[in-house]
Amino acid sequence: MDRELPEGLFGVGVVGAPMAGGPSRPALAEAVSRAGGLGFLAAGYKTPDAMAREVDELFATGLAFGVNLFVPTSEPVDREAILAYRERLRPLAERLGVELPEPRWTDDDAHPAKLARLLERVPPVVSLTFALPSAGDVASLRRAGAFVIQTVTDPGEARAAEELGVDAVVVQHPAAGGHFGAFSPGPAFAGELPDLVSAVRAAVGIPVLAAGGIGTRQAAHAVRSAGAAAVQLGTAFLRTQEAGTNPVHRAALADPAFQRTAQTRAFSGKTARGLENTFMRDFADAPAGYPTLHYLTAPLRAAAVAAGDPEGTNLWAGTGWREARDEPAAEVVARFAE
Ligand SMILES: Cc1cc2nc3c(=O)[nH]c(=O)nc-3n(C[C@H](O)[C@H](O)[C@H](O)COP(=O)(O)O)c2cc1C
């Protein structure tokens, strides 16, 4: 099979990673695509209507773009552990004067509706993360004209995605900011991103895009030399002028007081990387349980952002965060262009 990406779609080989929760607003996707990269919208946490409005906005630009979906996972959750975690959060909620919501165990119902909306007006690229979709969904999206990409984190997941019929994989290293899209059990890949790219390239015949901790031109060069067809950057765009990153998150990324990133489940019940803060340290042993924990901590995080407190909210960032700058998104695309 061809390991090249379709001509034109990925421009200069720089993908603006989908970043749900604010950063990926349409202005960012448009700026990335206009600069010659491939901009992405993030459907995560949005209603089908809100997603569709953003898709319409991007279609109006006449530019290529992608839309990313969270595929619902079917992992069993420990309800007792989640209820106990809710009790542990209660004193903090009282201090902040917010109500902890009743646990919401699933938001799977939004997924079929989002898929249906995308099939009505299919974007040039659709990417999927957190789990494998059904083969039928992949086939429908491709039939409708989308180039379909699955996020994977190791060679085994890449093979499973290829068998399902996707057009390409984006291989995400644990250095990545935000959620880690692993869907198979077992330890994360132990080597560096270029080694992971080589291993995935050896495992599949479809194009491999690379993501996770890419902060410099040299790092991008190293993954391209290992065979990556394009780089997908998230953190590098978080401080750009077009991103919808909230002011607390934006300021923390530039604050030398934050010394390291770490992985945590404390905010959402799913492993994600962010600047290490008090909330992550206090709740280091949080249980698994996405999206229940995401909804449970949402009012706490909103209160922290409203109060300008970076210690109480998620500050997603990859290991290359110190290289992220306050600049137009086009500068990032130019810096990392092939
Ligand atoms: C704030 C933030 C939000 C993210 N949201 C999503 C998302 O909605 N969907 C997704 O597939 N990946 C998401 N990611 C992961 C990115 O797709 C990508 O893997 C990651 O940003 C690459 O690592 P880097 O941040 O070190 O560049 C997010 C990352 C960040 C930083």
Image (spheres, rainbow, N blue to C red):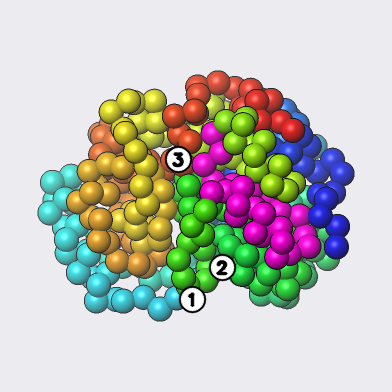
x and y, in percent, of residue 322 in the image: 44, 29
The residue carrying mark 3 is 319
Q: Quadrant of residue 224?
A: top right
x and y, in percent, of residue 51 in the image: 60, 51
Q: Secondary structure at mark 1?
A: loop
The residue carrying mark 1 is 74
Amino acid carrying label 2: it is: Ala
Amino acid carrying label 1: it is: Ser
Q: Secondary structure at mark 3?
A: loop
Mark 3 vs mark 1: in front: 3
Q: Secondary structure at mark 2?
A: loop
- The answer to whether the residues at label 1 and label 2 have Cβ atoms under 8 Å apart is yes
Task: Please give the range of residues in magenta.
Answer: 192-215
Indicate which disc, 3 or 1, sits on the residue closer to the N terminus. Answer: 1
Q: Alpha-carbon neighbours of circle 2 within 10 Å: few (<14), some, or many (≥20)?
A: many
Q: Quadrant of residue 156?
A: bottom right
Question: Is residue 81 on the magenta stretch?
Answer: no
3D distance between C-alphas at marks 2 and 3:
24 Å
Q: Alpha-carbon neighbours of circle 3 within 10 Å: few (<14), some, or many (≥20)?
A: many
Q: Is 241 rendered above or below residue 91?
A: above
- In the picture, measured across the screen, residue 56 lies left or right of residue 5, that is left
